[in-house]
Image (spheres, rainbow, N blue to C red):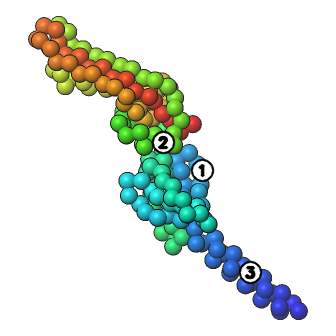
Amino acid sequence: MKKNLLLFLLSLSSFLSAQISKEDVILKINGDSLRVNIISVDEKISFNYPNEKIISSLSKNCISKIIFSSGRTENFSEKIIVNGVQDWEKVLITTNPEDVKCLVRKGEVRASANNTWNFDSAMTVEKKSMEKFKKEATKLKAHIILIEDQFKKGTTYWEGDVSSKYGIAYGYE
């Protein structure tokens, strides 16, 4: 009797571990994990949930790593920590809405710079505008900005160049 019970428990244990190992695990940047079946790893990660046929996808920017059912792991994005304005260079800029799909909207950011009556080049004006833009995002504890609109104008020598940006800042929480 004890021998049969032991065999049954061993069989059950093997069966359960085989069922669990059939699934891949997606570890999202925000700490959530998903048990899924990975279909493809391209610009997006395509997957479906166990016992479902609908295909879902996530941007690689939302994923920390994938642990495949084979045991192999593949790392993707590392979490970007923005503690304050001093971390402005860490802020990412994107024009692709998919890059912010799984993130939390923090707020709108705007910045502009110009070189009226000075000798800065158009490139310097653009750099100043971008730096201000990223610093605005750090004030919201955001690490990525989805650019909605940008305006660059190169005019005469006396009027100078102008660079303006508008976007939505996003973060993990």
21 sits left or right of 151 in the view: right
Q: In the rendering, at what x and y percent does residue 140 appear?
A: 50, 26
Instruction: Give the label on residue 12, or none.
Output: 3
Q: Residue at x 48, y 38 (%)?
A: 81
Q: Residue at x 46, y 23 (%)?
A: 108
User: 57 or 29, which is in the foreground?
Assistant: 57
173 in relation to 86, above or below: below
Compared with 98, 154 (above or below) is above
Residue 12 in which image quadrant: bottom right
Residue position marked by numbered label 1 in the rendering: 32
Q: Amino acid at mark 1?
A: Asp
How far is mark 3 from mark 2, CA to CA?
Answer: 40 Å
Dot in front, 3 or 2: 2
Q: Is residue 146 visible?
A: yes
Specify which label sits upstream in the sequence, 3 or 1. 3
- Tell me the element at label 3: helix
Can you identify the residue that label 2 sits on? 101
Q: Where is residue 83 drawn, in percent x and y?
A: 50, 31
Decide: is 5 above or below 128. below
Extreme-right residue of the structure: 1
Q: What residue is rendered at 42% in x and 42% in y?
A: 99
Quadrant where the C terminus sits is top right
| Badge 3 density bin: few <14, some 14–19, many ≥20, Cα 10 Å | few
The label nearer to you, 1 versus 2, is 2
* Residue type (three-letter) at the residue carrying disc 3: Leu
Which one is earlier in the sequence, the residue at label 3 or at label 2? 3
